[in-house]
Image: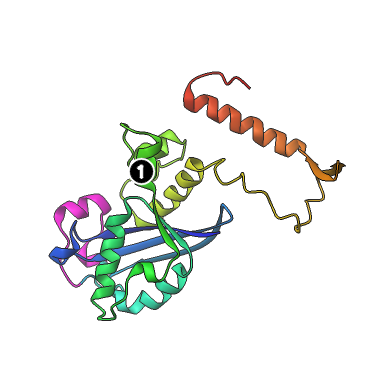
Amino acid sequence: MRRIVLDTETTGLNPEQGHRVIEIGAVEIVNRRVTGRTFHTYLNPDREIDAGAVEVHGLTSDFLADKPRFPDVVAEFLDYIADAELVIHNAPFDVGFLNSELRRLDSGDNLRSHCLSVLDTLKMAKEIHPGQKNNLDALCRRYDVDNSGRAYHGALLDAQLLAEVYLAMTRGQESLAIESFLTPPPQSRHVGVVQGVKVFKASEADLAEHRAYLDKMAKDCGKTLAW
């Protein structure tokens, strides 16, 4: 499974009022591993940036004056997200802005026609942690993700933080999927057969990782686990 964790920064809050995307940052995850393959660009919006938005992301019109415009990068961006699930915190915001940029090209295009699906991690977090703060900073604290370098919002930095948060939030949910029997087991594991069924014994590294996971669960719930 290929996922793209994505974030944007904008000139304001509402694309229907003419506000534009000024930064796109994205991080690739393949088989639950961050690959290091990223997409990042600043964009010249050809309009002023709301003062409130500058206070959030620190991007000014002077800084963006020599940056490319959305039509200059759209082909590369759409190729990067092709056939992937997009993972976005508060997805309606970012999807709405990117669709607005695509509509400006008079192509009749939209973001969902280029990706497999869109996962909203804000919605997911609210379901897992109802009644609690679920913004990115709160989730970083909850899942021990270091966000000390986040003086301002930044699309690439926030995508990198969200990738770590997403993997922490979903730890255990996807690991239940067992590798295909057609895939040879790692050589470090011992393989036995019990009544015709292959048995893979956990290595010392597997056991250490399991113990660390249980310790993390105990810390998160504040209780000693029963197993």
> Relative to 43, is 154 above or below?
above
Name of the residue lying farthest toward the front: 195
Q: Please name the residue shown 65% across and 30% down the image.
A: 211
Colour setting: rainbow
| Residue 68 visible to an observer of this rendering | no
Q: How many marks?
A: 1
Q: Is residue 48 magenta?
A: yes
Q: Position of residue 206 (x, y in %)?
A: 71, 38
Quarter of the image where one finds residue 58: bottom left
Density class for disc 1 (Cα within 10 Å; few <14, some 14-19, many ≥20) is some
Closer to the camera in the image, 101 or 226: 226
The quadrant of the image that shows the C terminus is top right
Closer to the camera in the image, 215 or 50: 215
User: Mark 1 — residue?
Assistant: 136
Closer to the camera in the image, 187 or 183: 183
Q: Position of residue 73 (x, y in %)?
A: 36, 75
Q: Please name the residue shown 46% across and 36% down the image.
A: 143
Q: Is residue 202 left or right of residue 212?
A: right
Closer to the camera in the image, 1 or 182: 182
Q: Is residue 75 magenta?
A: no
> Relative to 79, is 34 above or below?
above
Q: Please name the residue shown 50% across and 41% down the image.
A: 168
Write down the region rendered in magenta.
46-63
Which amino acid type corresponds to the residue marked 1 in the rendered image?
Answer: Leu
Q: Position of residue 59 (x, y in %)?
A: 25, 59
Q: Is residue 110 left or right of residue 176?
A: left
The quadrant of the image that shows the N terminus is bottom right
Q: Position of residue 64 (x, y in %)?
A: 26, 68
Say which element carries label 1. Answer: helix
